[in-house]
Image (spheres, rainbow, N blue to C red):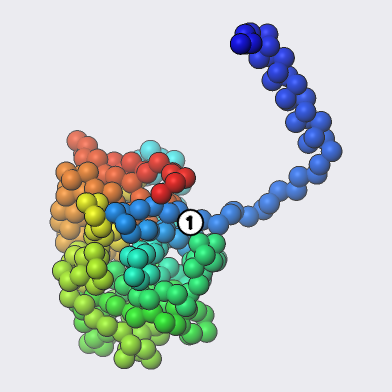
Amino acid sequence: MARVTRRGILAGSAAASFGTAAHSALAAAPPAGKAGPAIYRYRIGTYELTALYDGIWYRPIGKNFIRNAPFADVEHALDAAFMPHDRLATPFTTLIVNTGQKLVLLDTGTGGQISPTAGMVVENLAAAGIAPTEVDQIVISHFHPDHINGIKDKDNNLIFPNAEIMVPEPEWAFWMDDANMNAAPAAMTETFRNQRRIFSDIAKRVTHFAPGKEVAPGIETLAAPGHTPGHTVFAVHSGNQSLMVLSDTAQHPAVFARHPDWQAAFDVDGAETIVTRKKLFDRAAADRMLVTGYHFPFPACGHLVKTATGYEHVPIEWQTTL
Ligand SMILES: [Zn+2]
């Protein structure tokens, strides 16, 4: 057997790097200038899940961003997460669940109607080898535009023409009630108008479910009110594995998992949001459940660990085989 000596290793690596240098001197390497497809596949039991990145929005924030904490504390949290003080990184990740029988899409992304740096669901779906016509069922967590706008394109056409659309009954009851729209503060008017643009002409094909019901085999829905009145999360079960789909129980975990008592300006009922968040996070941490959050950094799944002051999100390790 040949003895590997330190000198031999050094000589070998010198030869290798000489070869690389010689090669790169000959080839021009223009920068790509754009990111690649962003999909991530994992399994829960026999179900295959595909996280589809829709992109990111940098939400402008100011002194009133957190209702119940001084902005200096918020700035401190942003510093700790290496985030700027004037905008909150708000990534969007939708999820396809392949049950073996059906392709179920949990929330639809922005449809390219929120931010120029988002709207990539269809492109990433293509990278995942799935055509929009193949999606059988869409299940919506709540009616904010970043979750429902991807039902339609900018020209009001259905992006997933064959999919049944399922929405939480209490969410429909609150937002589609014109009395609530008329009584709402001006800042919410656009949200109500957008919901009518998306749903009014397709109301007949929209199915309502009561949170608590199973919407497909192994896909359980759970009431998670606060962020909006009918805000719903999902638990996906297959075999002896489960995944908690937290929807908007918390937005960026560096801010809202570490500071679970913080009420964001965009939560409809701040106090109820906190109760829901702690209940679900405690369960996920105690059961060591895999979780995914719609606004967690891509691929948006990992675990939650309880700390002395809140929770820490531990991202999943990227895996190359399922
Ligand atoms: Zn959202």
The image position of residue 4, as x and y in percent, is 62, 11
Which corner quadrant of the image does residue 151 belong to? Answer: bottom left
Which residue is label 1 attached to?
39
Q: Is residue 144 left or right of residue 36?
A: left
Q: Nearer the viewer, residue 150 or 9?
A: 9
Q: Is residue 237 left or right of residue 317?
A: left
Q: Amino acid at mark 1?
A: Ile
Q: Nearer the viewer, residue 178 or 203?
A: 203
Report crowding for label 1: few under 14, some 14 to 19, many 20 or more residues within 10 A (C-alpha).
many
Q: Looking at the image, which residue is at 17% across and 75% down? A: 210
Is residue 68 shown to the viewer in this render? no
Q: Looking at the image, which residue is at 35% across and 53% down? A: 43
Q: Is residue 17 left or right of residue 178?
A: right
Q: Looking at the image, which residue is at 48% across and 74% down? A: 132
Which corner quadrant of the image does residue 166 belong to? Answer: bottom left
Quadrant into which the N terminus falls: top right
